[in-house]
Amino acid sequence: MAGNPEDPVNRAPKSLRLQIGLFGRTNVGKSSFLNMVTGQDVAVTSAVPGTTTDVVEKAMEMLPIGPVMFLDTGGIDDATRLSAQRLKRTRRVFERADIYVLLVEPDCWTEYEKTVLAAARQYDCACLILPQVQTIRDALDYESAAVVVNERRYRQVLERLGRTPDLVVCDSQVVEQMVNETPAGIPCTTFSILFARLKGDLCAAARGAAAIEALGDGDRVLVAEACTHHPVEDDIGRVKIPRWLREATGCDLRIDTTSGRDYPDNLEDYRLIVHCGACMLTRREMLARIQRASAAGVPITNYGVCIAALHRVLRRVLEPFPEAWTAYENPTKPNSMNATASIQTASSRQGGFPCSVHP
């Protein structure tokens, strides 16, 4: 909450406030995040890249932390004429921020994000990454212990744990390695699959993945992303998933991509829709997209479910959600809770993560 401006805590000098820097690529949602946290239209948001031209400051009281100062920066991948000046201002925030909040697109990790992490290490700052941080936060809220490790040390840390973990969650791009290195009997999944259940309908995504094997030459596939970002080399939605789809099917597929809130009206022209984790959409919006695909008779799946299926590890990462694996094996069987019913209850859903698995 913004707090009462007459309260002494809201008159705290700027220099004594906890400085929280918001970083990320152009149009990843930094300003939208700031507006959501403050409950105000502090920063202008637009689909036009580079809307935030200078660092936007917003002082507020964040209980129980106290007085804080949010610093909304321009995109770290800004390629406009004024990019040099904007990036210079953004880099000044590296030196100023006590906490870095890095907003990212699911399954998309580039040199720009690495730049922010390098700065965080250089200035010894805490760094939070979404959506992973949401999953970790939910685990802590349910009195669980969360251990975070990179893929290079995963096997070593797993062997040294004092007990068998109740759940292992990984980035979709290392899912094959994680499955190979995780002993049988330990439930495992991916962040993107968790978001398929949090933001949409995991069973629908599993049924959609079953349609991959039926794709043929000339079939059209839509890859839909909820945010707008600057495509990079080996982009997950524009490069990796299309490549893996063609390799797995051996077919000459026609693959289109959309981003942001653009969603085609001609969904019936596609044989499959592969959607991102929808971290930039509300649950209601994502369920509406699933419903539109269903009405058009087009299977729809999720990045994480699709990637796991293409790497032949889907059964393993759906073990925590047996109903989803059943949906994959029986794709023509109706789901017990369709998208329409889900939309009606989406706004009233409260409490913990719908996707969480709690021991």
Image (tube, grey):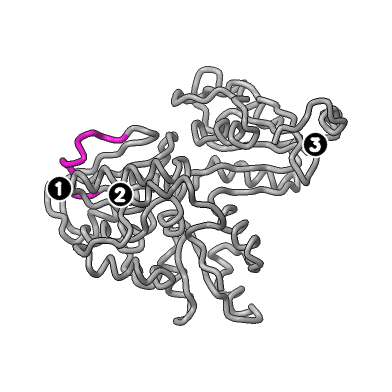
Q: Earlier in the sequence, mark 1 or mark 2?
A: 1
Q: Earlier in the sequence, mark 2 or mark 3?
A: 3
User: The residue tagged with tag 3: helix, strand or loop?
Assistant: strand
- Is 26 left or right of 293, judged from the image as shown? right
Q: Residue 174 or 187: which is nearer the viewer?
A: 187
Q: Nearer the viewer, mark 1 or mark 3?
A: 3
Look at 29% across and 70% down and name the residue there.
Answer: 326
The quarter of the image holding the C terminus is: bottom right
Q: Which mark is residue 219?
A: 1
Q: Which mark is residue 274?
A: 2
Residue 128 horizontal/vertical position (percent)? 64, 48
Binning the other alpha carbons within 10 Å of mark 3 as few (below 14), some (14 to 19) or many (20 upward) gives many
Residue 265 forms part of the magenta stretch: yes
> Where does the magenta region start and end?
263-272
* Residue type highlighted by circle 1: Asp
Q: Main secondary structure of the magenta part?
A: loop
Binning the other alpha carbons within 10 Å of mark 1 as few (below 14), some (14 to 19) or many (20 upward) gives some
Residue 211 horizontal/vertical position (percent)? 21, 58
- Is 151 left or right of 199, judged from the image as shown? right
Between the residue at mark 1 and the residue at mark 2, the CA separation in whole angstroms equals 14 Å
Residue 156 forms part of the magenta stretch: no
Look at 31% across and 48% down and name the residue there.
Answer: 340
Q: Residue 237 or 304: which is nearer the viewer?
A: 304
